[in-house]
Amino acid sequence: MSIFSANKILKTYQGSPVIEDVSLELNRGEVVCLLGASGIGKTTLFNVMSGLEAPDEGEVFLEGVDITAQPGNVSYMLQKDLLMPYKTVIDNVAIPLVLKGENKKVAREIASEFFDKFGLKGYENFYPNQLSGGMRQRAALLRTYLNHKEVVLLDEPFSALDSLTKMEMHRWFLEIFSQLNISAIFITHDIDEAIFLSDRIYIMSGRPGKITYELTVPYERPREIDFYTSPVFNHCKKEILSNLKCIDLISKSRL
């Protein structure tokens, strides 16, 4: 059942369309990927879906309610972790609770209950510059989760990590999201990442950006590292690459 959806979104800047006729949906408990090259309009779409920007046309729905251009209804984690360097990890993570009016001490107590689950136990009083890249991302994800929104939008959450750290974070991400029953859409331009993490993948291509293909990954979560070499993974990757090649050929034929 769809919990969150965007319907026929058009967004222009200075009179030129950046994304056009974009529709997608997220079912409860799903992890969905928006896959596409840099500059194709993925972040613009997320800004619209999060309510930070109003579309020129189209609507955004959360559980059937129109939330177009209404920020604060879904959690949104930007590409950079944006941890405040002068605050400890516990105070960074507790920010959403404090902003909602919670007493700082109580906010810390609530946030600290999740530190073990998010692999941050013992780092409460560290500062961001004392953490590894992977741990900073865990802290940022916990802060996003503490917004207590059922739908989470993640803009390239693992792009700043090295390949080995990223692989470990992928496994942890699927495990924690299954435990907490979070529904998420994330942006990436990494095909392997999209396949490993997603239940479904939307490919965005063209100028202006449009959804040109949708792929279901027929493999249950959670997934282990050997999924990367499985027949299902290779089939999905071949299908995506074939689709992207077709799009590229069509674009060149129009030049």
Image (cartoon, rainbow, N blue to C red):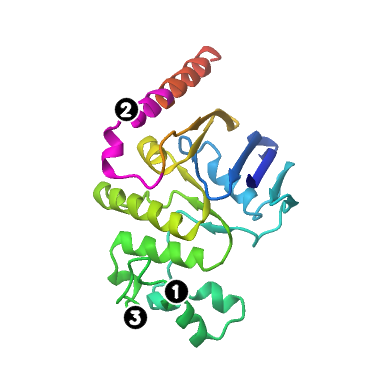
Whole-angstrom CA distance, mark 1 to mark 3, is 10 Å
Mark 3 residue type: Asn
> Relative to 216, is 126 on the left or the right?
left
Mark toward the start of the polypeptide (2 vs 1): 1
Residue 174 image offset from top left, x and y in percent: 40, 51
Mark 2, other Cα within 10 Å: few <14 / some 14–19 / many ≥20: few
Secondary structure of residue under mark 3: loop
The residue segment tinted magenta is 221-239
Mark toward the start of the polypeptide (1 vs 3): 1
Indicate whether 174 appears above or below 141. Answer: above
Q: Residue at horizontal 42%, vertical 52%? A: 157
> Relative to 100, is 176 on the left or the right?
left
Q: Residue at horizontal 40%, vertical 45%? A: 221
Secondary structure of residue under mark 1: helix
* Residue 86 visible here: no
Residue 135 image offset from top left, x and y in percent: 32, 64
| Residue that numbered label 1 is attached to | 92
Secondary structure of residue under mark 2: helix
Q: Residue furthest front?
A: 220
Whole-angstrom CA distance, mark 2 to mark 1, is 42 Å
| Residue that numbered label 3 is attached to | 125
Q: Nearer the viewer, residue 18 or 246?
A: 246
Whole-angstrom CA distance, mark 3 to mark 2, is 45 Å
| Residue that numbered label 2 is attached to | 231
Q: Quadrant of residue 242?
A: top left
Indicate whether 242 appears above or below 214. Answer: above
Residue 172 image offset from top left, x and y in percent: 34, 55
Mark 1 residue type: Asn
Mark toward the start of the polypeptide (3 vs 2): 3
